[in-house]
Amino acid sequence: MITDSFDNKTNAKINPNIGDGRVKCDACVVTFSNIIEEYVTKKFDTEIVGYIKTVNGKKPVYVINYNNKRIAFYKTILGAPTAVGCLEDVREIIDTDKYIVFGGAGCLDKAIARGKLMIPTEAYRDEGTSYHYAEPADYITVKNSSIVANFMNSKKLPYVIGKTWTTDAFYRETESNILKRKNDGCISVEMECSAFQAVCNFRGVEFYCFLSSGDLLDSPVWDERISDRDDYRGTQHDSRLFDIAIELADYVS
């Protein structure tokens, strides 16, 4: 069974090459959005310090000087296995123990407005990756959620907190499973949070996360809640999310 996969008694055959020469950074910001990446490279003076090499191309790793701190930044890949793989690989390039991850999520509560910031407190492990990095359990605690909430309070940014549902199967969010997760207290659904927390715990680094409420599943039919596909406000491509993320990176570093 996948839930029996955690093995901390024997060594992995393949490991990240964590050696000398890594670029020292105060924190690292991670996005999923190509629109955000374009925004960052236009707004900030970025330096490419390396590349994450994947089968579908090289992904640049940038460093930004921000408030006298060096903040790394890169665009990851959707889904727990690949997003965790990118984080493992980026640790070969940069030296930091703080990772700030933000993105969009499906909403499981119609009372939460589109674009509202959500801070996950626990993540339901409906994916496979985390079971290779942590003991089996239904949920994993997102341990720095209170720090993220304190930051939001300091900036007077409105948010909601609650559990999130991390799934590998975007097209298998069935009505029954949605109801189970909603009744369990989940307010969002996404594809990476539980795995990010598991790998960060395993590698001894800190994970900070916030989400933007996107499409709505708490309705008779799926509601994308998008009227204009060129309007990125309130979506995971909203550049204001990066502005929040880099301020959070400054706050925790």
Image (spheres, grey):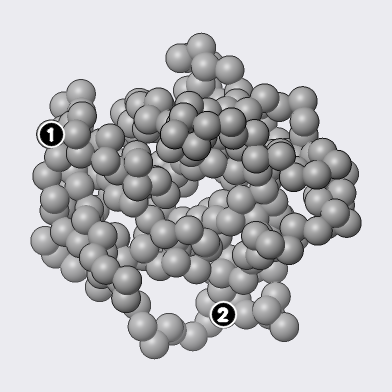
Q: Give the Cα distance between marks 2 and 1.
A: 43 Å
What x and y, as percent, mark residue 136? 69, 68
What x and y, as percent, mark residue 18? 25, 68
Indicate left or right for 45 with 187 as reference: left
Quadrant for the C terminus in the image: top left
Q: Earlier in the sequence, mark 2 or mark 1?
A: 2
Residue 169 vertical placement versus 230 (above, below)? below
What x and y, as percent, mark residue 120? 62, 39
The numbered dot on residue 7 is 2
Give the secondary structure at mark 2: loop
Indicate left or right for 108 with 53 as reference: right
Q: Are marks 2 and 1 in contact (CB under 8 Å)?
A: no
The numbered dot on residue 68 is none
Q: Residue at x 87, y 49 (%)?
A: 179
- The quarter of the picture where residue 72 lies is top left
Q: Residues within 10 Å of mark 1 (few under 14, many from 20)?
A: few
Q: Residue at x 55, y 56 (%)?
A: 192
Residue 35 vertical placement versus 147 (above, below)? below
Indicate left or right for 154 with 51 as reference: right
| Residue 229 visible in this rendered orientation of the protein | yes
Quadrant for the N terminus in the image: bottom right
Instruction: Name the residue carrying label 1.
Output: 45
In the depicted view, which residue is nearer to us: 49 or 99?
49
Residue 192 vertical placement versus 65 (above, below)? below
Give the secondary structure at mark 1: loop
Q: Residue at x 52, y 17 (%)?
A: 157
In the depicted view, which residue is nearer to us: 224 or 94?
224
What amino acid type is highlighted by mark number 2?
Answer: Asp
Q: Residue at x 19, y 68 (%)?
A: 19
In the depicted view, which residue is nearer to us: 41 or 51?
41
What amino acid type is highlighted by mark number 1?
Answer: Asp
